Amino acid sequence: MLFVGADQVMGGSHSDVVLWVSYEPKTRFIDIVSVPRDVLIKWDEHKSWIPRKLSEILFLNTRQHGMESGVLLFKKELEKFLDVKFDYYMIVTFDAFVHVIDALGKIPVTVDIPMHYDDYWGGLHIHFEPGDYMMSGAEALKYVRFRHSALGDMGRIKRQQDFVRNLIAHCFDISVLSALPDLINIYREDIFTNFKWRDILVLADVFRTFDAEHQRYQILPGVSQRIGAKDVWRLDEKSAEEIKASIAGSEKELWPRSKIRPFIIKRGPDSLGGIQAEVFNASGRSGLAEALSEKLRSYGCDVVLWGNWGNYKKYTEVIARTGELSKAVRTASILGCSRVRTDIDPDRMVDISVVVGDDFPKEFLDARK
């Protein structure tokens, strides 16, 4: 599914939120990949094409062809770019977003940095101090749009992912049925989608029994680059293929595994060179964080911190802390770990966090490289 949050200005729409969502019904597992709005879609330096960012593609198509036809052309462009077929799409305007949140009720949000920005021309005023909030639709829209921090658009993507997590969890605590009349009106008037109403009822039933732990969030990998007068996000094609492979294998994500499974993989002594990591034990078995830290150092990894995670985890995971997913994927490959996600946190000053779950076999620590 392609999910887009977009404004409507000057006869067209710019994409502010683009999510590539995949649901695996066998394991009821959801993958959500954030696609940066500045990702470079079209450009050929040899033919002097104008570089086009994802948000521009949506605006140009909707301005020229109208919202419904423009959305379909935008979907086609993104499918070609990602080499992915979207069965469904949903375009939610800012007005629709506000109406949906207000229909569902206020959403809990934790603001971790001061958020202050004024756009007098555009009429946008964002002012939040750090703390816990119950946000209305209008407040939530400001929260997910804010990007004037040290991390820029990457920070905004992280906040958007956090908000989606909170929204999904919140949907388990309310009676969605009581909000259905309002949601039906919003669906008919403000949302552009090929979902039929019966499809949405099926989704509502899925969410009714969904396990909030069965989610994985990632960011489409790439590097920031300047082309002409534009700042763009240049796709890392190799890492993008790794994301596709992880999504394609999501049907096995929650299946029972043997204790050894493919954790024991032979690699060279410098396989993890150039990676700074922290290691935490969430398995309930003592000594694993320290032992794994020494093992990772033998692969060239610079482990700067180890300790206890603080709560129990069933499965081991590797968390990318800088948005550079390839380092997390490389580490996960050595561990044989299929759980990789992005949670940008520059204050940690590491590339990755390794959280050792109960499925981690002690045999890996004794194996030779």
Image: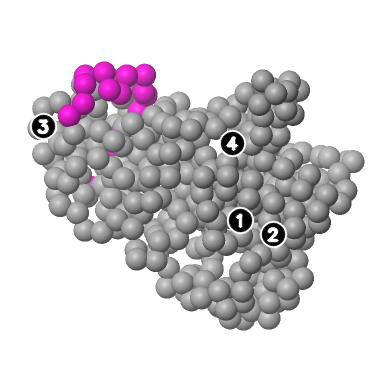
3D distance between C-alphas at marks 1 and 3: 44 Å
Question: Foreground: 339 or 290?
Answer: 339
Please state the horizontal and vertical placement of residue 292, each as a whole percent of the image.
Answer: 21, 32
Query: Could you tell me the amino acid type at mark 1?
Result: Phe
In this view, which residue lies farthest toward the front? 47
Q: Earlier in the sequence, mark 2 or mark 4?
A: 2
Callout 4 environment at 10 Å: few (<14), some (14 to 19), or many (20+)?
some
Q: Main secondary structure of the magenta part?
A: loop
SS class of the residue under badge 2?
Answer: strand
3D distance between C-alphas at marks 2 and 4: 21 Å
Q: Quadrant of residue 55?
A: top right
Q: Where is mark 3, residue-wise?
A: 367
Q: Quadrant of residue 328?
A: top left
Give the magenta part as a residue range.
Answer: 266-283
Callout 3 environment at 10 Å: few (<14), some (14 to 19), or many (20+)?
few
Query: Could you tell me the amino acid type at mark 3?
Result: Ala
Query: Could you tell me the amino acid type at mark 4?
Result: Met
Q: Where is mark 2, residue-wise?
A: 92
Mark in the foreground, 2 or 4: 2
| Residue drawn at 51 percent across, 41 percent down | 219
| Residue drawn at 28 percent across, 50 percent down | 315
**Residue 154 numbered mark, or none:** 4
Q: As drawn, is 156 to the left or to the right of 301?
A: right
Please state the horizontal and vertical placement of residue 94, each as a whole percent of the image.
Answer: 75, 56
- Magenta stretch contains residue 36: no
SS class of the residue under badge 3?
Answer: loop
Placement of the N terminus among the 4 image quadrants: bottom right
- Magenta stretch contains residue 272: yes
Q: Where is mark 1, residue-wise?
A: 3
Q: State if disc 2 and disc 3 touch (CB < 8 Å).
A: no
